[in-house]
Image (spheres, grey):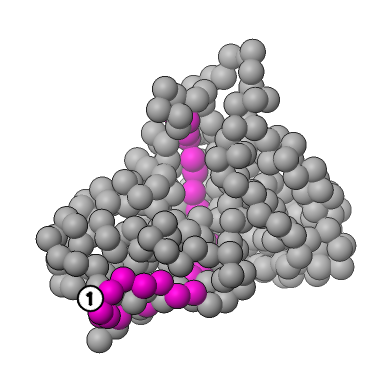
Amino acid sequence: MSVTVRVPAKVNVQLAVGAARPDGFHDLANVFLAVGLYDEVTVTAADELRVTCTGPDADQVPLDRTNLAARAALALAERYGRTADVHLHIAKDIPVAGGMAGGSADGAGALLACDALWGTGASREELLDICAELGSDVPFSLVGGAALGTGRGERLTELEVGGDLHWVFAMAARGLSTPAVFREFDRLAEGREIPEPVASRELLDALAKGDVDALAATLSNDLQPAALSLFPELADTLAAGRAAGALATLVSGSGPTTAFLARDAEGAEEVAGALRASGTCRTVRTAAGPVPGATVV
Protein backbone atom coordinates (compact mmCIF):
# COMPACT_ATOMS: atom_id res chain seq x y z
CA MET A 1 0.00 0.00 0.00
CA SER A 2 1.12 3.56 -0.70
CA VAL A 3 -0.23 7.06 -0.08
CA THR A 4 0.44 10.10 -2.29
CA VAL A 5 0.10 13.68 -1.08
CA ARG A 6 0.18 16.74 -3.32
CA VAL A 7 1.66 19.93 -1.78
CA PRO A 8 1.81 23.45 -3.28
CA ALA A 9 4.56 26.04 -3.54
CA LYS A 10 4.21 29.39 -1.82
CA VAL A 11 4.91 33.01 -2.60
CA ASN A 12 5.36 35.62 0.11
CA VAL A 13 3.21 38.62 -0.75
CA GLN A 14 4.69 40.36 2.29
CA LEU A 15 7.79 39.39 4.23
CA ALA A 16 8.58 41.78 7.07
CA VAL A 17 11.72 40.81 8.98
CA GLY A 18 12.67 41.88 12.49
CA ALA A 19 16.09 42.00 14.10
CA ALA A 20 17.99 38.78 14.81
CA ARG A 21 16.83 37.09 18.04
CA PRO A 22 19.20 35.53 20.60
CA ASP A 23 18.39 32.08 19.10
CA GLY A 24 19.55 33.27 15.68
CA PHE A 25 16.07 33.35 14.17
CA HIS A 26 14.20 36.53 13.20
CA ASP A 27 10.65 37.50 14.10
CA LEU A 28 8.59 37.76 10.93
CA ALA A 29 5.30 39.02 9.61
CA ASN A 30 5.02 36.65 6.69
CA VAL A 31 1.96 36.73 4.43
CA PHE A 32 1.94 33.43 2.57
CA LEU A 33 -0.06 32.54 -0.53
CA ALA A 34 -0.12 28.95 -1.81
CA VAL A 35 0.14 28.73 -5.61
CA GLY A 36 -0.49 25.97 -8.11
CA LEU A 37 3.00 24.50 -8.55
CA TYR A 38 3.17 21.16 -6.79
CA ASP A 39 5.44 18.45 -5.44
CA GLU A 40 3.96 15.01 -4.87
CA VAL A 41 5.25 12.81 -2.04
CA THR A 42 4.45 9.08 -2.22
CA VAL A 43 5.03 6.96 0.88
CA THR A 44 5.20 3.15 0.65
CA ALA A 45 5.92 0.62 3.38
CA ALA A 46 9.53 -0.63 3.11
CA ASP A 47 12.24 -2.48 5.04
CA GLU A 48 14.02 0.76 5.94
CA LEU A 49 13.76 4.51 5.48
CA ARG A 50 14.89 5.66 2.07
CA VAL A 51 14.29 8.71 -0.12
CA THR A 52 14.18 8.99 -3.90
CA CYS A 53 13.46 12.03 -6.04
CA THR A 54 12.65 12.76 -9.67
CA GLY A 55 11.88 15.98 -11.55
CA PRO A 56 13.64 19.26 -12.35
CA ASP A 57 16.89 19.67 -10.38
CA ALA A 58 16.24 16.41 -8.48
CA ASP A 59 20.02 15.95 -8.34
CA GLN A 60 20.17 18.89 -5.89
CA VAL A 61 17.77 17.26 -3.40
CA PRO A 62 19.44 15.44 -0.47
CA LEU A 63 18.40 11.80 -0.24
CA ASP A 64 19.61 11.19 3.33
CA ARG A 65 18.01 11.90 6.69
CA THR A 66 18.61 15.63 6.35
CA ASN A 67 15.79 15.73 3.77
CA LEU A 68 12.73 17.34 5.37
CA ALA A 69 10.50 14.51 4.13
CA ALA A 70 12.70 11.97 5.93
CA ARG A 71 12.80 14.15 9.05
CA ALA A 72 8.99 14.38 9.00
CA ALA A 73 8.61 10.60 8.79
CA LEU A 74 11.08 10.14 11.65
CA ALA A 75 9.36 12.77 13.81
CA LEU A 76 5.91 11.22 13.39
CA ALA A 77 7.28 7.70 13.97
CA GLU A 78 9.03 8.80 17.16
CA ARG A 79 5.88 10.47 18.47
CA TYR A 80 3.85 7.30 17.92
CA GLY A 81 6.49 4.80 19.04
CA ARG A 82 7.12 3.08 15.74
CA THR A 83 9.88 2.82 13.15
CA ALA A 84 9.91 4.93 10.00
CA ASP A 85 10.33 2.01 7.62
CA VAL A 86 9.06 3.71 4.48
CA HIS A 87 10.17 4.58 0.97
CA LEU A 88 9.58 8.29 0.38
CA HIS A 89 9.44 9.25 -3.28
CA ILE A 90 9.36 12.95 -4.12
CA ALA A 91 8.17 14.01 -7.58
CA LYS A 92 9.56 17.57 -7.75
CA ASP A 93 7.96 20.39 -9.64
CA ILE A 94 8.56 23.21 -7.13
CA PRO A 95 11.91 24.91 -7.79
CA VAL A 96 14.77 23.61 -5.64
CA ALA A 97 16.45 26.27 -3.43
CA GLY A 98 14.15 28.82 -5.03
CA GLY A 99 12.47 30.56 -2.10
CA MET A 100 9.13 28.84 -2.79
CA ALA A 101 9.23 26.36 0.13
CA GLY A 102 9.77 23.21 -1.93
CA GLY A 103 11.63 21.44 0.87
CA SER A 104 9.02 22.53 3.39
CA ALA A 105 6.29 21.24 1.06
CA ASP A 106 8.00 17.84 0.97
CA GLY A 107 8.14 17.76 4.77
CA ALA A 108 4.45 18.55 5.11
CA GLY A 109 3.57 16.07 2.36
CA ALA A 110 5.56 13.25 3.95
CA LEU A 111 4.02 13.97 7.34
CA LEU A 112 0.46 13.80 6.04
CA ALA A 113 1.21 10.74 3.89
CA CYS A 114 2.83 8.81 6.77
CA ASP A 115 -0.08 9.73 9.04
CA ALA A 116 -2.48 8.26 6.48
CA LEU A 117 -0.34 5.18 5.74
CA TRP A 118 0.19 4.32 9.40
CA GLY A 119 -3.30 5.30 10.55
CA THR A 120 -1.86 7.28 13.44
CA GLY A 121 -4.91 9.55 13.52
CA ALA A 122 -2.87 12.56 14.58
CA SER A 123 -4.93 15.72 15.09
CA ARG A 124 -4.37 18.78 12.92
CA GLU A 125 -2.83 20.50 15.96
CA GLU A 126 -0.36 17.62 16.44
CA LEU A 127 0.61 17.71 12.77
CA LEU A 128 1.10 21.48 12.89
CA ASP A 129 3.21 21.10 16.04
CA ILE A 130 5.51 18.62 14.25
CA CYS A 131 5.59 20.92 11.20
CA ALA A 132 6.77 23.82 13.37
CA GLU A 133 9.57 21.64 14.77
CA LEU A 134 10.68 20.81 11.22
CA GLY A 135 10.91 24.38 9.93
CA SER A 136 9.35 27.82 9.81
CA ASP A 137 7.57 27.36 6.45
CA VAL A 138 6.40 23.76 6.97
CA PRO A 139 3.14 24.57 8.83
CA PHE A 140 1.95 26.73 5.93
CA SER A 141 2.67 23.95 3.44
CA LEU A 142 0.23 21.81 5.40
CA VAL A 143 -2.44 24.54 5.65
CA GLY A 144 -2.22 26.22 2.23
CA GLY A 145 -4.58 28.94 1.05
CA ALA A 146 -3.37 32.23 2.49
CA ALA A 147 -2.11 32.91 5.98
CA LEU A 148 -0.17 35.35 8.12
CA GLY A 149 2.82 33.69 9.77
CA THR A 150 4.23 35.31 12.91
CA GLY A 151 6.98 34.30 15.32
CA ARG A 152 9.56 32.87 12.91
CA GLY A 153 6.66 32.28 10.49
CA GLU A 154 5.31 29.10 12.09
CA ARG A 155 2.33 30.62 13.98
CA LEU A 156 -0.43 30.91 11.40
CA THR A 157 -3.59 32.95 11.10
CA GLU A 158 -5.55 31.95 8.00
CA LEU A 159 -6.59 34.79 5.68
CA GLU A 160 -9.40 35.35 3.22
CA VAL A 161 -8.58 36.06 -0.42
CA GLY A 162 -11.27 37.59 -2.63
CA GLY A 163 -10.43 35.82 -5.89
CA ASP A 164 -7.68 34.13 -7.87
CA LEU A 165 -4.34 35.91 -8.18
CA HIS A 166 -2.22 35.22 -11.27
CA TRP A 167 1.54 34.99 -11.02
CA VAL A 168 4.62 34.41 -13.14
CA PHE A 169 7.71 32.87 -11.55
CA ALA A 170 11.17 33.13 -13.09
CA MET A 171 13.70 30.54 -11.94
CA ALA A 172 17.30 31.69 -11.66
CA ALA A 173 20.39 29.95 -12.96
CA ARG A 174 21.52 29.02 -9.45
CA GLY A 175 20.08 28.73 -5.95
CA LEU A 176 20.41 30.90 -2.87
CA SER A 177 20.84 29.62 0.66
CA THR A 178 18.16 30.95 3.02
CA PRO A 179 20.61 31.20 5.97
CA ALA A 180 23.05 33.11 3.75
CA VAL A 181 20.33 35.59 2.76
CA PHE A 182 19.40 36.18 6.42
CA ARG A 183 23.10 36.69 7.26
CA GLU A 184 23.31 39.26 4.49
CA PHE A 185 20.14 40.92 5.82
CA ASP A 186 21.83 41.20 9.22
CA ARG A 187 25.01 42.60 7.65
CA LEU A 188 23.09 45.22 5.67
CA ALA A 189 21.09 46.15 8.79
CA GLU A 190 24.12 46.75 11.02
CA GLY A 191 23.95 50.04 12.89
CA ARG A 192 20.29 50.82 12.24
CA GLU A 193 17.13 50.27 14.22
CA ILE A 194 14.95 47.51 12.77
CA PRO A 195 11.24 47.96 13.54
CA GLU A 196 9.04 45.15 14.80
CA PRO A 197 7.63 43.25 11.80
CA VAL A 198 3.95 43.99 11.24
CA ALA A 199 1.59 42.86 8.48
CA SER A 200 0.42 45.69 6.24
CA ARG A 201 -3.27 46.45 6.84
CA GLU A 202 -3.54 47.78 3.27
CA LEU A 203 -2.12 44.52 1.91
CA LEU A 204 -4.44 42.34 4.01
CA ASP A 205 -7.43 44.41 2.87
CA ALA A 206 -6.34 44.12 -0.76
CA LEU A 207 -6.05 40.34 -0.40
CA ALA A 208 -9.46 40.05 1.22
CA LYS A 209 -11.07 42.10 -1.57
CA GLY A 210 -9.10 40.45 -4.35
CA ASP A 211 -8.06 43.96 -5.44
CA VAL A 212 -5.07 43.21 -7.63
CA ASP A 213 -4.08 46.87 -8.12
CA ALA A 214 -4.10 47.59 -4.38
CA LEU A 215 -2.18 44.38 -3.78
CA ALA A 216 0.42 45.33 -6.39
CA ALA A 217 0.98 48.63 -4.57
CA THR A 218 1.60 46.93 -1.22
CA LEU A 219 3.73 43.82 -2.02
CA SER A 220 7.02 43.91 -0.10
CA ASN A 221 9.93 41.69 0.89
CA ASP A 222 12.49 42.87 3.46
CA LEU A 223 14.88 40.13 2.28
CA GLN A 224 14.94 41.43 -1.30
CA PRO A 225 17.91 43.81 -0.82
CA ALA A 226 19.93 40.97 0.71
CA ALA A 227 19.02 38.58 -2.11
CA LEU A 228 19.96 41.21 -4.70
CA SER A 229 23.23 41.90 -2.88
CA LEU A 230 24.18 38.22 -3.13
CA PHE A 231 22.72 37.73 -6.65
CA PRO A 232 22.79 41.14 -8.46
CA GLU A 233 21.64 39.64 -11.77
CA LEU A 234 18.15 39.20 -10.31
CA ALA A 235 17.64 42.93 -10.85
CA ASP A 236 17.73 42.30 -14.63
CA THR A 237 14.97 39.69 -14.31
CA LEU A 238 12.84 42.01 -12.19
CA ALA A 239 13.32 44.82 -14.75
CA ALA A 240 12.38 42.53 -17.64
CA GLY A 241 9.13 41.51 -15.93
CA ARG A 242 8.30 45.13 -15.12
CA ALA A 243 8.91 46.14 -18.74
CA ALA A 244 6.66 43.28 -19.88
CA GLY A 245 3.70 44.71 -17.98
CA ALA A 246 3.75 42.96 -14.61
CA LEU A 247 1.72 44.92 -12.06
CA ALA A 248 4.35 44.24 -9.39
CA THR A 249 7.65 42.42 -9.08
CA LEU A 250 9.50 40.97 -6.13
CA VAL A 251 11.95 38.32 -5.05
CA SER A 252 10.02 35.36 -3.62
CA GLY A 253 11.01 34.78 0.01
CA SER A 254 14.77 34.39 0.29
CA GLY A 255 15.03 33.98 -3.49
CA PRO A 256 16.37 33.56 -6.03
CA THR A 257 13.01 32.89 -7.74
CA THR A 258 11.42 36.18 -8.81
CA ALA A 259 7.65 36.66 -8.75
CA PHE A 260 5.49 38.85 -10.99
CA LEU A 261 1.86 39.72 -10.29
CA ALA A 262 -0.34 39.89 -13.39
CA ARG A 263 -3.85 41.24 -13.84
CA ASP A 264 -5.25 37.98 -15.20
CA ALA A 265 -4.24 34.66 -16.80
CA GLU A 266 -3.74 36.29 -20.21
CA GLY A 267 -1.52 38.98 -18.72
CA ALA A 268 0.52 36.31 -16.95
CA GLU A 269 1.15 34.50 -20.23
CA GLU A 270 2.33 37.76 -21.84
CA VAL A 271 4.77 38.45 -19.00
CA ALA A 272 5.97 34.84 -19.08
CA GLY A 273 6.65 35.03 -22.81
CA ALA A 274 8.65 38.22 -22.44
CA LEU A 275 10.68 36.79 -19.58
CA ARG A 276 11.48 33.64 -21.58
CA ALA A 277 12.72 35.84 -24.42
CA SER A 278 14.71 38.14 -22.12
CA GLY A 279 17.55 35.70 -21.42
CA THR A 280 17.62 36.84 -17.79
CA CYS A 281 16.38 33.59 -16.22
CA ARG A 282 16.56 29.82 -16.62
CA THR A 283 12.89 28.82 -16.79
CA VAL A 284 9.53 30.53 -16.37
CA ARG A 285 6.27 29.19 -14.91
CA THR A 286 2.78 30.61 -14.43
CA ALA A 287 0.51 29.71 -11.51
CA ALA A 288 -2.53 31.03 -9.71
CA GLY A 289 -3.43 31.07 -6.04
CA PRO A 290 -4.69 30.57 -3.45
CA VAL A 291 -4.80 26.76 -3.61
CA PRO A 292 -5.27 24.18 -0.82
CA GLY A 293 -2.35 22.91 1.25
CA ALA A 294 -1.15 19.31 1.51
CA THR A 295 -3.85 16.97 0.18
CA VAL A 296 -4.04 13.18 -0.12
CA VAL A 297 -4.66 12.32 -3.79
* Side of 63 where 116 appears, left or right: left
In the rendered image of this protein, does residue 259 appear above or below residue 46? above
Question: In this view of the protein, which residue sits in the foreground, 43 or 206?
Answer: 43
The residue lying at 43 percent from left, 49 percent from top is: 137
> Residue 94: image x %, image y %?
56, 66
Q: Amino acid at mark 1?
A: Leu
Is 47 within the magenta? yes
The residue lying at 70 percent from left, 35 percent from top is: 225
Q: Which residue is mark 1?
A: 117
Q: Which quadrant holds residue 51?
A: bottom left
> Residue 188: image x %, image y %?
68, 25
Residue found farthest to the left: 81
> Residue 19: image x %, image y %?
52, 23
Question: Split into 4 quadrants, where in the image is the N terminus?
Answer: bottom left
Q: Residues within 10 Å of mark 1 (few under 14, many from 20)?
A: some
> Which residues are drawn in magenta?
26-53
Residue 119 appears in the figure: yes
